[in-house]
Each structure stands twice: as C-alpha cells, then as structure tokens.
Image (cartoon, coloured by chain):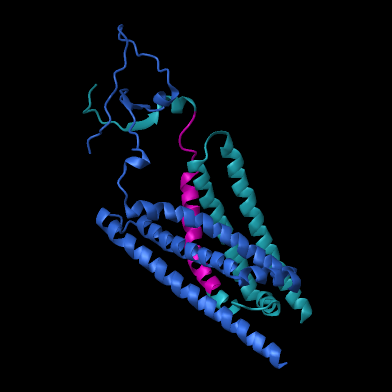
Amino acid sequence: MNTSTPHIEVMRSQLGRARGLGAGQSGTAHWWAERASAASLLPLSTWFVVQMFRLGGADHAEVARWGAKPCNATMLAAVIITTFYHAQVGLQVIVDDYVHGKAHLPARLAVKIVTSLLGLLGVFAVIKLVAGGSSSK
Amino acid sequence: MQARWAPIQRRDRDGVQAPMQDIRKALYVGSRSDGTLIERPMSPHLQVYRYRLSMVLSISNRITGVIATGGAALGVFWLGAAAKGPKAFETARKVTGNPLGQLVLLGWLGSVVYHTVGGIRHLIWDAGHRYDKEELNKDGPVAVKVTAGVSAVLGIALLCVAGRRRHARAKAAKVS
C-alpha cells in the first residue's frame, strides 16, 4: 500500500467498531467536571481546615452555634456538595478503569447512589443546624 | 515518530483474508484509513516495568482519593450527629476523641493533603507545565516532602488545639 498517501491512522479495532465500542462522547465534559470541582475544592477545603482549628475539641453547643451562622452554613454546604460531586466523578473513573463485565453497571450505580446520599445527608445536617440555631436564639 | 506496529498480512493460500477466531486478538486489529490492517499497540504489562517513584505517586493519588471520600463520609456522619443533638454528638466525640479514632482522622488528613498536592500537580500538568521526564522526576520527591510536612504540621497543630480546648473545658467544669 502507498504509505506516502496522507492518511490518519485509525487505532480502533474493526470488531470494536462493529460492536459500537469507542468514545462515549462524554469524556471531555467529565474531564472538565473533575478539574473544575478540584480547583473549587482548593479554597473550600482550606476554609474547612481553618474551621477545624476553630472547632477541634469543641462541645455540642459550640458546634451548633458555629453551624447556625449563615456564612458557615453556606460554605459548609458548598464544601459538602463539591466534595461529593468530585468524589462521584473521580470514583466513576476508577470503576470504569478497574471493574469490568457484569459488575460494571452495578458498581457505577453504587458510586452514584452512595455519593449522592452522603452529600444529601450532609446538606440536610447543615439545614438542621441552621434551623435549630435560629429558633433557640 | 515511526510507528512500531506493523501492517499484518493474514491471508490464506488463495490470498483471501483469513477469518479471525479469537475475540481478544480481533480487538487488536485496527485499520488505517488507507485500508491496511495493522496490529494495534499493546501497553506493556505492569510487572515488566522497573520500579519508579512516579508510578507509586500516580496510583497513590487514586488511593488517597478513595480514602479521602471515606473520610468525607465520616465527616458527614459527624455533622449529622451534631445536627441530631447533644447525645448523638457525645457518641461521635467518643469516636473522634479516642486514639484509634484520631489515627483514622490523621490518615484522612494525610490522604486529603496528598490528594490535594497530587491534584495541584495534575492541574499544573494540564496547563502544560512540568511534564518532562526530568521535571516529573524532580517534582515527585518534592511532592512527598510537602505532603509529609504539611500533614505533620496540620496534624500536630489540630491535636494540640483540640487537647487544649478539652483541657480548658475540664478545668472550667471543675471550678464551677
């Protein structure tokens, strides 16, 4: 075959093409979601570490008073949502890389469900802390 | 760069393309857009590589990511306990206050710090910097040292702050 003809090498197998394997068309968005949430987590987790210095060894009243402040609650909710979103996106890559065959779909669903529920639990805890704080004052 | 994969000629006596029997093999057959069949490159198996720090750091970023998620789950339970009330929070403090719990918390802290350092490196690479072989090998040990330093300082400082606050409260309780 004439190798000097300009051409692009298609590095996909013919069986793969016949089976419809290959790019799922959502890779770039997924990659961006991972980076954007990672970059957002830099200031958010720094804030969280600073708060832990304020709360280390604190008792319930102190934590409740801290969580009742709207600013803290907002940042806390942002930390929780971004953390579990980033975890979901990242764990999905790990599942895609290492879990094959029949276990793949259940594993992927489990990642989605568990990270979503944990995030929801965190957000509702924040809401309860804010609500509880305002009523007691 | 010259391709290392060779065009494959698998034909029977009549010059007809021989049918592929093995699925695994078939998935390695690709075609160029000019029609030639080629054998796709296969990445070498993990065990044929000589040990490098960079590969440990690479997989560590994933492992610490998983541990950080587990720690975040514990953090959410802690927050849930605080939201539930003083009694639940006391139970949570029994977990965070005992040595085993604090070891877990330190592990979480170290994982988050490493994952953050690794993440920053990834963002730098994505921006197109520090991705040459020499730069990678130079930055790896730095990442390890930064992780160790930051984790140790944060861990000790947090333990001190928590201990002092607990101590002060115990003293106040005794006075009153």
**Chain B drawn colour:** blue
Above or below A30: residue B170: below
Q: Quadrant of residue B87?
A: bottom right
Q: Along the horizontal axis of the image, is A23 left or right of B37?
A: right
Above or below B83: residue A111: above
Q: Along the horizontal axis of the image, is B175 left or right of A32?
A: right
Q: Quadrant of residue B82?
A: bottom right
Q: Residue at x 64, y 53 (%)?
A: A116
Above or below A40: residue A101: above
Q: Between residues A45 and B106, which one lies in front from this camera angle?
A: B106
Q: Is residue A39 magenta?
A: yes
Report x, y in % for residue A110.
62, 46
Report x, y in % for residue A48.
55, 71
Report x, y in % for residue A16.
45, 28
Question: Please, what is the dominant secondary structure of the magenta stretch?
Answer: helix
Q: Residue furthest right?
A: A135
Total marks drawn? Answer: 0
- Image quarter of the N terminus of chain B: top left
Q: Between residues A98 and A65, which one lies in front from this camera angle?
A: A98
- Image quarter of the C terminus of chain B: bottom right
**Chain A drawn colour:** cyan
Q: Residue at x 66, y 70 (%)?
A: B94
Above or below A71: residue A39: above
Q: Residue furthest bottom?
A: B175
Q: Residue furthest front?
A: B99
Residue range in magenta is A20-49
Q: Residue at x 60, y 83 (%)?
A: B165
Q: Is residue A106 magenta?
A: no
Q: Residue at x 61, y 84 (%)?
A: B167
Report x, y in % for residue A1.
24, 21
Q: Between residues A56 and A23, which one lies in front from this camera angle?
A: A56
